[in-house]
Image (tube, rainbow, N blue to C red):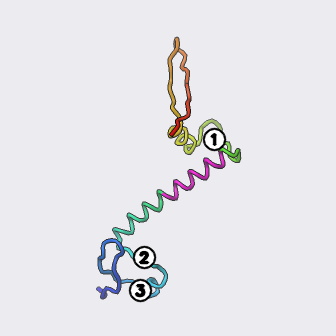
Amino acid sequence: MRNPNTFCKDCQKPLYRRPSELKKWDNVYCGICKKSHMKEFAISGNDARYLRYIKMWKNGEVTGMKGKYSISNHIKRYLLRNMIISVVNVSGVKLINLQIKYH
């Protein structure tokens, strides 16, 4: 095992990294802390894609469809978060009522 030359930014665990790696990165993490930061990055990346897609949908740049008959998952997520959906059964016929949530 090599002598540690740096420390994990989160848990302060002593680590060895090549000098070339230390020049590239400002923040050095151990394996456990690195995994937790990767999850945060993935979540924020997905949210950014979601918001970009919704903006394009509102501007009419994309249809919001997935294939020929299905609605995009981004659109479903948007509607579930921003709409009040109530389904009423009137004499065997389902009526769907959509209302915008006001935050």
Q: Which portion, as a residue range, is magenta? A: 44-57
In percent of width and height, residue 37 lies at 41, 65
Name the amino acid, label 1. Met
Name the amino acid, label 2. Asn
Secondary structure found at label 2:
loop
Q: Nearer the viewer, residue 94 or 70?
A: 94
In percent of width and height, residue 18 lies at 41, 86
Q: Going by the image, does 55 lie left or right of 19?
A: right
* Residue found 69% across the figure and 46% down from its top: 59
**Dot 2 corresponds to which residue?**
27
Q: Nearer the viewer, residue 17 or 97?
A: 97
**Dot 1 corresponds to which residue?**
65
Residue 11 magenta-highlighted: no
Name the amino acid, label 3. Arg
- Give the class, few, some or many, for how many residues have Cα within 10 Å of label 1's Cα (few <14, many ≥20): some
**Dot 3 corresponds to which residue?**
18
Distance Cα–Cα, label 3 vs label 2: 14 Å
Q: For residue 93, what is the image quadrant?
A: top right
Residue 49 magenta-highlighted: yes
In percent of width and height, residue 48 lies at 55, 56
* Residue found 61% across the figure and 53% down from its top: 52
Mark whose residue sits in front, 3 or 2 = 2
